[in-house]
Structure formats: C-alpha cells, structure tokens
Amino acid sequence: MTMDFEAELLAVSTERATRRAAIKKYPALSVVISTARPSDLSNILRQLELQTMKKFELLLGIHKFKMSPTHKSAITRLQKRGISVITQDFSPAHTLGSVLTTMAQRSSGEYLAKMDDDDIYGPEHLRDLMDTAITTGAEVVGKAMNYIYLEAIDLTVRRMGPTGIASVNQWDDWVCGGTILVKSSSARAAGWFGEGKSAVDHFLLSGVKNNGGKIYRTFGLGYIYKRSIATQTYITNYSKYLRGTSGQKVGIWSHEEFGNVG
C-alpha cells in the first residue's frame, strides 16, 4: 500500500532524527550550480539562504548573462552568514558540462553537491543529503523522484512506489540529477561532469559506478523536480509523470518541507 503524505512526513521525521543522532560533525561541503537564467538564479539563491546546513562553499557558474545588483545582494547575505561564494562568468560557447566541471575543479569540500537552478529545494535539502552520505558511506547519494512539477499544466504530482526511480532508501545506479551529492575524490576520479551539452548527471554517476563506487537513493521529500515548458536539455514527455501518481496538487506543492509556505 502506498504511503500517504502525512505518513511520509512522519517517516521522514523519524529517519532524520535517527541519522542525525549518529552524526557528531559534518565534513566540508561544496555546492556547484550552473545557471543560465537571471530569474532562476534569484530563486536558487533564495532557497540557499533558507538551508539549515550552516556552512558550505558555493560555486556559481554564470552562463550567458551578468549578475544584477539583486543577485549580488543575495550573495552578500550568504557571505555574511559565513558561506564562501565563488562565481565565474562563462560565454555561450561553453557547454553545461564544461561549466559544472570547471567550477567543481575549484571546489575545496570533502563532498560536492550539485543543484539545478530551476528545481525546488526545501530548507533541509543539503543536510538530508549529508546525513545520508555519512550514515551510509556511499560515494554518491541523492533523492528519489517523488515530486514533479509540470509547468505546462501547472500541476505537481506525487509518485511513490516500492520499485523504480520513486523508490526510497535503495542502493541503485540512479538518483535525481539535481540532488547529486558525491565524495569529491570520487567525482574527480570520474572526470567530474564531463564536457558535454547534456547528460552531465549520467556522466558522473556512470563514472563513479564504473570505478567501483556505490550509489544510494534516499527519500525525495523536500525536493521538487521541475519540468519547465522550454528550458530543459531534452524534450519532455508529460504522460510518463502522470501515470500511477500517489497524489496531485494544482500549482507547486506547498509545504514547509519545500520551503514555500508563507
């Protein structure tokens, strides 16, 4: 029987408490983001400000545009709370892979998280991933695809199941690309994110796996995978997301777990 939303909230709360009770100190974390749209940069900076992970290094690859004073003000706020921010501008000639790889090579953390500027992240996102990495010992951890916002029809679908990409707490070879957290040494050995225009997540995951690394997929609560109308690197087939849903809400699913209440 599929777990309902309230039961999921309780299960995740219990799981967080258990994992965090076993953690005395968090290793250094770096976060890498490639952004090509000013509005998406504003949104992801807002979500980063709300993260409960107290300290991390942020590496922003600014692709095809210049930051505005508003962006710079948001970065200043992050810096005031002790977060190191490194930015680098990239011309249109650079690929997504080259932007991410260049920025990842500049990172200094023991772990590296990749975030996508157009997805939705709750305040516990980074800490959830670090909890999972520390307690499992996996080379890569990430989240299940449990929540998907389909912009073209303004609908968020909830998908839960015992198998496939919606299944949680599984050793597998796949996690949502916007939630990848990897040991930096493993990412370096895999060639980071490659140099391609797309499939950068697959490049990293397959590289880590081919090197003998293990991949663990945790719960998807606190993350919404956003399928925008015309901004992704491949064509969207919405029907695959609408089949076998465990719940739907018009608009973006609103809850404190997603950091979008109030």
Image: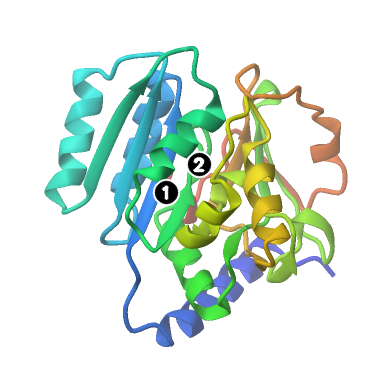
Residue 245 vs residue 123: left or right? right
Q: Residues within 10 Å of mark 1 (few under 14, many from 20)?
A: many
Q: Which mark is residue 126?
A: none
Rendered image coloring scheme: rainbow
**Left or right of residue 208: residue 188:** left
Q: Tell which tag, 2 or 1, sits nearer the viewer.
A: 2
* Along the viewing direction, whichever of 100 and 217 lies nearer the viewer: 100
At x 53%, y 38%, the residue is 119
* Residue at the left extreme of this rendering: 80
Picture coordinates of residue 79 (x, y %)?
Answer: 16, 45
At label 2, the amino acid type is: Ile
Mark 2 and mark 1 in contact? Answer it, CB < 8 Å. Answer: yes
- Residue at 25% across / 26% down in the picture? 71
The amino acid type of the residue labelled 1 equals Gly
Q: Residues within 10 Å of mark 2 (few under 14, many from 20)?
A: many
Q: Considering the image in quadrants, where does the C terminus appear?
A: top left
103 or 224: nearer the viewer: 103
Determine which quarter of the picture holds residue 51: bottom left
In the rendered image, residue 181, in percent from the top left (x then y), is placed at 52, 57
Q: CA distance from mark 2 to mark 1?
A: 8 Å
The front one of 78 and 207 is 207
SS label for mark 1: loop
Q: Quadrant of residue 15?
A: bottom right
Earlier in the chain: of badge 2 and badge 1, it is 2
Q: Answer left or right for 225 relative to 39.
A: right
Does residue 226 lie above or below 50 as drawn?
above
Question: Which residue carries the number 2 mark?
Answer: 120
Residue 14 is left or right of residue 68, and the answer is right
Quadrant showing the N terminus: bottom right
Residue topped by disc 1: 259
